[in-house]
Image (tube, rainbow, N blue to C red):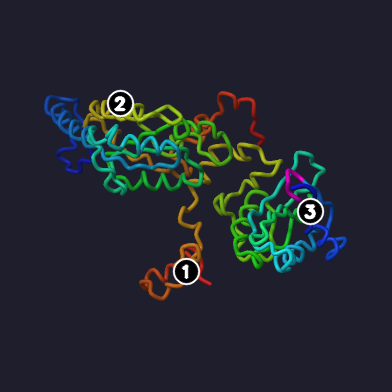
Amino acid sequence: MGLTNPELTTVSTVSPNWVTTRLDFLTNWARANSLWPMPFGTACCAIEYMATAASRFDLARFGMERQSFSPRQADVLICAGRLPFKLAPVIRRIWDQMPQPKWSISMGACASSGGIFDNYSMVQGIDTIIPVDVYVPGCPPRPEGLLYGIMLLQKKIKGESITDDGLREEKLVGPSGLFLPPERVDELSEPFGNSVQQTRSA
Amino acid sequence: MTGLSASIAALRAEFGDAIGRSLASCGGSIVYASRERSHDVLAWLKNTPAEGYNYLADVTAVEYRDPERPLEVVYQLRSLSRRADLRVKVALDKAGPLEVRSVVDLWRGADWLEREVFDMFGIVFTGHPDLRRILMWETYAEGYPLRKDFPLRGHFSRAEQTRQALAANPEAHYSMEELSIADAFNELPTDMRERLARGERGFLK
């Protein structure tokens, strides 16, 4: 929520009551239906994203009328495409620049898991760089798939509560240089599928 | 197109021992030049009117799976006026220094091509004006990705790779020349000029 008034923040220490649930309903309804996306398109998924935003599929029907090309005015970061390590600090900076409340969608196989690019240059899932709310599978996902992911995100937002302190917590890059424990990053980046035949040499 | 390019016989007449074997491959001609005289050979091919290879289509390198075979730097030349192609290769023994003379002074377009070969293979182009990594970030420490001894996933663990990538400054990759504002330096605001002079985003020469 980002409430700074101390009198209001005391509300969050008590259990959900009639006031907070009504307030939740209102704020979540407003947020879920006016998500402004920050497109981070790096590959073919971005083409599908553009198709989703264009007239046939029309993202504006879901409250995403305004494509926010400034992270300062964005609510949801959509990473559409593979993320090379060289772009990792870029997407991290964009994520840090976005104000709360914010969400992120990992669109496509490469953004979600590295996809076919299990190599030295590619991030194995953007969840090792930024927190992710919704993963959309596909290579690339069709616009219907992305719309379904967006509707899932709206459903998720409608279930949020201001009494949950952890929701709006910034997950910053810590002193270890990562925002997750290193073991967790290794685990998330673990090879799978055909690539288990290949071994890491060091 | 069958047979060897006529340029190869001319090269042999001009440079003698500095020209190694030559072969015809897939309709094109390949000729090997010695490492020491590669720059002379390429300059001659460019500047001799009868040859006129005025366009450098590509500079790349090959490492073969056979560990005994040397690395090869490949120059793909084209004469725009004669519509003729020639591939010049320079073999670099892996035991010796992986160095070859830069041809940026002949073809300005070789700048980024040679940087890419340096980035991917670790071949040093002596005389290159700005030999830095171009595809990987400049602080990349794992080695040269297209070498055969480089594992597909890199040397470091994924956590370490992610940590190093996040620690990189995304704005540090560009020199002033690449930003194309070097000429406009004196028109910039004072504070920006100070920052640039300190080298925060590259140095002004």
Tell me the chain of label 2.
A
Q: Gap in Å between the C-alphas at discs 3 and 1?
A: 47 Å
Q: Nearer the viewer, mark 3 or mark 2?
A: 3
Q: Amino acid at mark 1?
A: Arg
- Label 3: state its secondary structure: strand
Q: Position of residue A1 (x, y in %)?
A: 23, 37
Q: Which mark is residue A152?
A: 2
**In front here: B192 or B29?**
B29
**In front here: B177 or B136?**
B177
How busy is the neighbourhood of tag 3: few (under 14 within 10 Å), some, or many (20 plus)?
A: many
Q: Which residues are magenta?
A: B25-29
Q: Amino acid at mark 3?
A: Val
Q: Is residue B58 magenta?
A: no
The quadrant where residue A23 appears: top left
Is the residue A42 above or below the residue B188 in the image?
above
Q: Which mark is residue B31?
A: 3
